[in-house]
């Protein structure tokens, strides 16, 4: 049976059927998936019972795996997953749910803010692939915002104003918004990087707003003015008509293009286990 | 006086005609306005060419006024207006525009975040009365959110979860959100957090409302990041377009709102144009929550 993509939201996001990601994928299918990503920006694959190795192998079809260092406050010996897999769950090494005030859980709460993965890295991420190994019944949706549609909907005056603006991104800013306190060592690790506020997609050429909760300043602007403006743009970009909410079923694999979307997780009952494993395709520019 | 109201929004906010706010109000007039506020929460009076003294007199018809001294960052001698005014303009004492990086301007950008006036005081404000003397020609709208409607629209589980929660409010928190962190120790001392219930009941209408503000920094008994993430979710719910009235200013509009039932914020405007907006604030009469002992004393 051949692979098909069916749109699931107004401006973006598609559901893919007719493909098994646990085995080798043909070059034609890889090309079709890339083309689907360029068009839909978010693709949902249902019932993919991937092992970690199968998830890595599928991910490598699209580029190099991003490594985790510099992206979390969990120490190396505290990690549940290897460095080439990001842990978006709420479990410790022994598969126990984090205590309410566990520092790693506090840090992960930053995922409740709209963001683009690794926008705090000088070379930010291309795709993220998130596999739902244990999902929660209530809440815990992943919401995506189409940053191309958000850009298109800006008025001409704003487009001109922001065309050449450059933002500073750091985990310090997103965690600071939540009152999460970092150590001196972490502060040094989370040094801000610069990203354009408007970027063009390397394949489609479409422009999009490059926003993220990690953005904490605009170069050349007073910080409070920059933050207030970034809040306003984020509010614009995450209006309902630009958002697709993904309600998870176990073994869903969701793949998104960080170069033209933001995402966040919604609140859920954190006394219940949630095991979500992310692989990330490193960007190249 | 015959007070007539015309609705400005399906849920709340009304335009009032038949009232001249430059003249002394009778007790009956004031009561009629209070009754209208119990229903509409936001009232718009058009074409009110008030002097400062007239605005003070009108405001005092509804209770004691708050003094703004000791709440913001203005130094003695810097203030342009009588101490009972909160100056939400972009001009200084000499009526010159504040520079882009003026500390007072950057501080006032906190008004672009959703808030309820003086929620950072143990006894928070009742009404705010804002007079548009020189208004922005593009942008600068004041948006209001109906916090009664926001409460009513919550699901039952959320209502039960939050009904008895108590939050800490401080100017430090709202300014931190904008990266305005260079507060002096003296400023920090005057901005000590106070406690407010997250759900309050209106004295006039008996209606419950969500008592939110960007001044909230945490929920008592919760880890701070969890509290902040949750407060953001509630704020997003409470400020969805269906609950919001955007007021586009005309010169000499006088807008009066009930801080016990609404939040508000100003939208971005061109800082190269003067904007002269003068606010008087009617003090509340009660705390919403028990303060820490040291503060209640």
Image (cartoon, grey):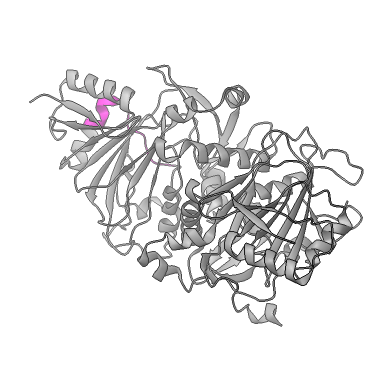
What is the total number of numbered labels drawn onto the structure image? 0
Residue B33 shown left or right of residue B7 in the figure: right
Compared with B96, B165 (above or below) is below
In what quadrant of the picture does the N terminus of chain B appear?
Answer: bottom right
Residue B69 visible in the displayed image: no
Residue A94 visible in the displayed image: yes
Residue A78: percent from left, percent from top: 36, 55
In what quadrant of the picture does the C terminus of chain B appear?
Answer: bottom right
Q: Write down the quadrant of residue A269 in the picture.
A: bottom left
Compared with A123, A184 (above or below) is below
Q: Write down the quadrant of residue A204 in the picture.
A: top left
Question: Residue placed farthest to the left in the image?
Answer: A1
Instruction: Please give the range of residues in magenta.
Output: A58-69
The foreground one among B164 and B284 is B284
Residue A2 shown left or right of residue A32 in the figure: left
* Residue visible at 15% across and 21% down in the picture: A26
* Residue visible at 53% across and 28% down in the picture: A154
Compared with A69, B296 (above or below) is below
The foreground one among A177 and B31 is B31
Determine if the magenta segment contains residue B155. no
Question: Residue placed farthest to the front in the image?
Answer: B2
Residue B90: percent from left, percent from top: 79, 42
Residue B253 shown left or right of residue B178 in the figure: right
């Amino acid at each position: 049976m051949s692979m098909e993509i069916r749109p699931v939201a107004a401006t973006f996001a598609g559901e893919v059927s007719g493909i098994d990601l646990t085995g080798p994928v043909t070059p034609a299918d890889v090309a079709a998936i890339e083309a689907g990503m360029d068009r839909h920006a978010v693709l949902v694959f249902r019932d993919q019972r991937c092992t970690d190795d199968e998830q890595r192998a599928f991910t490598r079809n699209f580029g190099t795996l991003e490594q985790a260092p510099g992206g979390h406050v969990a120490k190396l010996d505290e990690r549940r997953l290897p460095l080439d897999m990001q842990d978006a769950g709420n479990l410790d090494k022994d598969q126990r749910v984090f205590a309410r005030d566990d520092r790693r859980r506090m840090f992960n709460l930053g995922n409740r803010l709209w963001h683009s993965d690794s926008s705090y890295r000088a070379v930010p991420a291309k795709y993220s692939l998130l596999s739902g190994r244990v999902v929660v019944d209530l809440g815990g949706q992943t919401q995506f915002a189409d940053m191309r549609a958000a850009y298109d909907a800006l008025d001409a005056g704003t487009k001109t104003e922001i065309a050449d603006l450059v933002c500073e991104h750091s985990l310090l800013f997103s965690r600071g918004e939540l009152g999460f306190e970092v150590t001196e060592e972490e502060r040094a690790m989370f040094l801000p990087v610069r990203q354009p506020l408007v970027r063009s997609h390397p394949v489609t050429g479409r422009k999009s707003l490059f926003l993220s909760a990690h953005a904490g300043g605009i170069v050349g602007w007073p910080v409070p003015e920059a933050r207030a403006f970034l809040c306003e743009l984020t509010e614009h970009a995450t209006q309902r008509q630009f958002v697709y909410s993904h309600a998870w079923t176990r073994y869903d694999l969701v793949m998104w293009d960080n170069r033209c979307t933001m995402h966040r997780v919604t609140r859920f009952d954190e006394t219940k286990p949630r095991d979500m494993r992310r692989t990330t395709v490193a960007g190249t520019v | 006086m015959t007070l007539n109201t015309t609705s400005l929004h399906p849920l709340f906010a009304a335009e009032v005609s038949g009232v001249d706010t430059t003249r002394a109000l009778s007790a009956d007039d004031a009561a009629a306005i209070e009754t209208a506020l119990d229903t509409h929460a936001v009232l718009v009076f058009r074409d009110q060419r008030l002097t400062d003294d007239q605005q003070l007199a009108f405001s005092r018809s509804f209770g004691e006024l708050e003094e703004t001294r000791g709440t913001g960052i203005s130094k003695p001698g810097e203030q342009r207006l009588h101490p009972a005014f909160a100056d939400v303009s972009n001009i200084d004492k000499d009526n010159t525009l504040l520079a882009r990086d003026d500390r007072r301007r950057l501080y006032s950008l906190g008004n672009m975040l959703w808030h309820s006036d003086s929620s950072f005081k143990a006894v928070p404000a009742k009404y705010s009365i804002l007079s548009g003397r020189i208004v922005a020609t593009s942008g600068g709208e004041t948006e209001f959110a109906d916090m009664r409607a926001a409460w009513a629209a919550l699901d039952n589980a959320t209502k039960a979860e939050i009904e008895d929660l108590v939050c800490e409010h401080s100017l430090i928190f709202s300014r931190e959100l904008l990266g305005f962190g260079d507060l002096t120790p003296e400023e920090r001392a005057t901005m000590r957090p106070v406690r407010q219930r997250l759900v309050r009941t209106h004295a006039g209408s008996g209606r419950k409302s969500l008592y939110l503000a960007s001044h909230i920094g945490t929920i008592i008994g919760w880890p701070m990041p969890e509290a902040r993430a949750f407060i953001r979710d509630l704020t997003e719910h409470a400020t969805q377009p269906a609950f919001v009235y955007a007021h586009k200013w005309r010169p000499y509009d006088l807008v009066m709102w009930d801080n016990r039932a609404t939040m508000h914020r100003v939208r971005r405007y061109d800082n190269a144009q003067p904007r002269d907006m003068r606010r008087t604030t009617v003090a509340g009469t009660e705390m919403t929550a028990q303060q820490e002992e040291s503060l209640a004393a």
